[in-house]
């Protein structure tokens, strides 16, 4: 009998009501998303704790490692059941040398180049030594001593397949994450972000995704659903994984008793802005294209494309579009000389400057539209394993009609496409604060 089966058998004797399957399957393959309040079981005793592997991605984060590894060294967790792997993504600082000299108990795997968050995490998961539960932790985190015990608890007790932690800012004054949601075109939401902690943030809840910076997942489930999608490289890979888990019949829970502290976006600041923007524009397209069912995608995709193009134009830096308007073309000097002058002037102006952000947007959108057959096959692989309807999962979005830009023309388009494509009806009644957000 496997470790997990032994533990589950023991737990059933003391709390059988907590061990209902994560997907209450209906006849025909659909499932009913349970909306009852969560009541997690007590922290696990040492003998019930699973073998856990913590995977930490690092890229030039040497200055973070002492805080991260120092807190992990103080974990209240049996050492014989714990493995820590650092995947170094081609750092040029002293990360590898410092880890090997000062934290030799951390297993270090070094990549020659930056393969991205998704591939790096998958690499760590494959390298894990007989892990029952996989844990992913950012290198710019520090954790409370009972963080891991609390984080893996819901997974071992079969309350869910994956869990996510309560994440504070580094100084603990505000929150960084208390679970995740998104709007209809895939823009992720970290609940609680920059809010002062209140009792409301101490309530366990179902969540659309587990933040990839501090999450636990049943190892067998992680591998079965395909892990993180490596096409994402970084950003939104956790949204995609969480959404995919729900589609395939699993649950994800926010566990507020698992506490950690975070230096927000410290790694992303080291990259050129346009490279990050490309990922943040492209990857929501990937996630939506894969995870919505056919009926919903046919309504969302036109609106998503329209809003993305409008956002690109806003970022483009085009202040005067008159050179492109035929009705505003100056005929210039008449005759042969005039025509030659006009030809020379136009030849010198063949190129038009665009801001790098706008180019990043176009490239990102093109990564979906220019690889249609690939993404159709990726989509079909997810949809073939669907066990929950979109309507059930929508309850987890939190703010599906959230408008992300204040620009008046963008807001006009947002509201217009929502009405025209019937998205107001698709998400009707699911969000209490959409009107407030869209004023």
Image: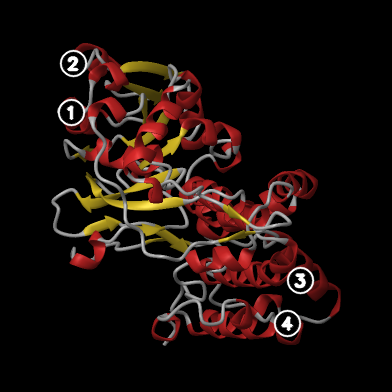
Q: Position of residue 320 (x, y in %)?
A: 57, 78
Instruction: Identify which residue is drawn at 27% across, 16% down.
Output: 80
Q: Is residue 431 above or below residue 317?
A: below
- Of tags 2 and 4, the one toward the viewer is 2
Q: CA distance from mark 4 to mark 1?
A: 63 Å
Q: CA distance from mark 4 to mark 3?
A: 11 Å
Give the left or right position of residue 113, taking residue 290 as reference: left
- Of tags 2 and 3, the one toward the viewer is 2
Q: Which residue is mark 2?
A: 102
Q: Position of residue 23 (x, y in %)?
A: 55, 51
Label 3: element kind? helix
Q: Is residue 28 visible?
A: yes
Q: Which residue is mark 4?
A: 329
Q: Which residue is mark 3?
A: 342
Instruction: Identify which residue is drawn at 46% across, 72% down.
Output: 399
Asked if marks 2 and 3 touch (Cβ < 8 Å), the reply is no
Instruction: Identify which residue is drawn at 22% across, 27% down.
Output: 77
Q: Which residue is mark 1?
A: 66
């Amino acid at each position: 009998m496997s470790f997990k089966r032994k533990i589950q058998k023991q737990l059933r004797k003391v709390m059988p009501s907590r061990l209902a399957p994560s997907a209450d399957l209906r006849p025909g393959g659909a499932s009913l998303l349970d909306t009852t309040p969560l009541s997690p079981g007590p922290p696990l005793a040492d003998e019930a704790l699973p073998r856990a592997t913590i995977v930490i991605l690092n890229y030039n984060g040497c200055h973070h490692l002492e805080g991260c590894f120092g807190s992990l060294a103080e974990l209240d967790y049996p050492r014989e059941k714990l493995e820590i792997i650092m995947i170094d993504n081609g750092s040029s600082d002293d990360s590898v040398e410092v880890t090997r000299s000062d934290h030799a108990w951390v297993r270090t795997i070094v990549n020659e180049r930056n393969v991205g968050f998704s591939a790096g995490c998958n690499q760590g998961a494959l390298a894990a030594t007989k892990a029952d539960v996989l844990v992913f932790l950012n290198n710019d985190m520090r954790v409370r001593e009972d963080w891991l015990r609390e984080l893996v608890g819901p997974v071992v007790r079969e309350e869910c397949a994956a869990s996510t932690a309560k994440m504070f800012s580094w100084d603990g004054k505000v929150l960084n994450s208390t679970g995740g949601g998104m709007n209809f075109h895939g823009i992720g939401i970290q609940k609680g972000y920059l809010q002062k902690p209140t009792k409301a943030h101490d309530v366990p809840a179902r969540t659309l995704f587990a933040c990839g910076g501090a999450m636990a997942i049943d190892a067998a489930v992680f591998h079965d659903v395909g892990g993180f999608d490596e096409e994402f490289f970084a950003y939104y890979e956790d949204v995609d994984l969480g959404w995919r888990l729900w589609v395939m019949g699993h649950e994800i829970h926010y566990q507020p008793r698992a506490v950690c502290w975070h230096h927000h976006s410290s790694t992303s600041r080291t990259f050129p802005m346009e490279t990050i923007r490309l990922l943040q524009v492209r990857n929501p397209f990937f996630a939506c294209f894969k995870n919505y069912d056919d009926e919903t995608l046919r309504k969302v995709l036109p609106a998503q494309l329209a809003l993305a193009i409008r956002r690109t134009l806003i970022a483009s830096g085009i202040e005067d579009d008159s050179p492109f308007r035929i009705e505003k073309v100056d005929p210039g000097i008449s005759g042969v000389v005039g025509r030659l002058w006009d030809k020379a002037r136009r030849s010198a102006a063949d190129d038009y400057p665009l801001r790098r952000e706008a180019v990043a947007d176009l490239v990102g959108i093109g990564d979906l539209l220019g690889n249609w057959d690939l993404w159709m096959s990726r989509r079909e692989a997810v949809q073939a394993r669907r066990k929950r309807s979109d309507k059930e999962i929508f309850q987890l979005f939190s703010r599906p009609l959230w408008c992300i830009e204040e620009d008046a023309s963008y807001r006009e388009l947002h509201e217009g496409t929502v009405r025209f494509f019937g998205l107001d009806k698709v998400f009707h009644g699911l969000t209490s604060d959409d009107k407030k957000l869209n004023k």
